[in-house]
Image: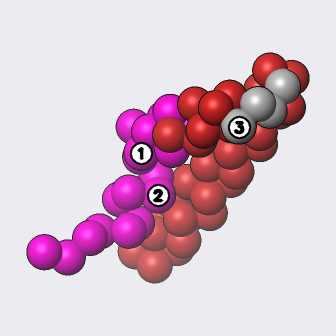
Amino acid sequence: MDINWKRKLTSRKFWAAVVGFITPILLAFGVSDSVTTQVTAIVMAGAAVVSYIIGEGFIDACGKEE
């Protein structure tokens, strides 16, 4: 079974799952709510950037312009 990484990394569900995994771990280790919120925000911001870069790369590879 091959994993389609381009599809995974641009999936909002994937990033929600990553945040859903990281958040309870941080809380279980006693990390404060404010730090947990900051980490969650950084992960989601990174997800937006990764999705944009992969999406634009796909458009460029197809030779299409917006």
- Quadrant of the rendered image containing residue 19: top right
Q: Is residue 62 left or right of residue 34?
A: left
In the image, 17 versus 62, the foreground residue is 17
Q: Disc 1 marks which amino acid? A: Phe
Precedes in sequence: disc 1 or disc 3 = 1
Give the residue at x 71% y 37%.
29
x then y, percent, for residue 2: 20, 76
- As displayed, is residue 10 above or below residue 39? below
Q: CA distance from mark 1 to mark 3?
A: 23 Å
The image shows residue 49, relative to residue 65, as above or below, that is above
Q: Secondary structure at mark 1?
A: helix
Tell me the amino acid under the disc marked 3.
Phe
Residue 43 shows up from this direction: yes
The label on residue 14 is 1
| Real-space CA distance between mark 1 and mark 2, rounded to the nearest whole angstrom | 7 Å
Do the residues bearing badges 1 and 2 touch, measured as CB atoms within 8 Å?
yes
Asked if the residue under mark 3 is in contact with the one under mark 2, i.e. CB atoms within 8 Å, the reply is no
Rendered residue at 62%/58% (across/down): 50
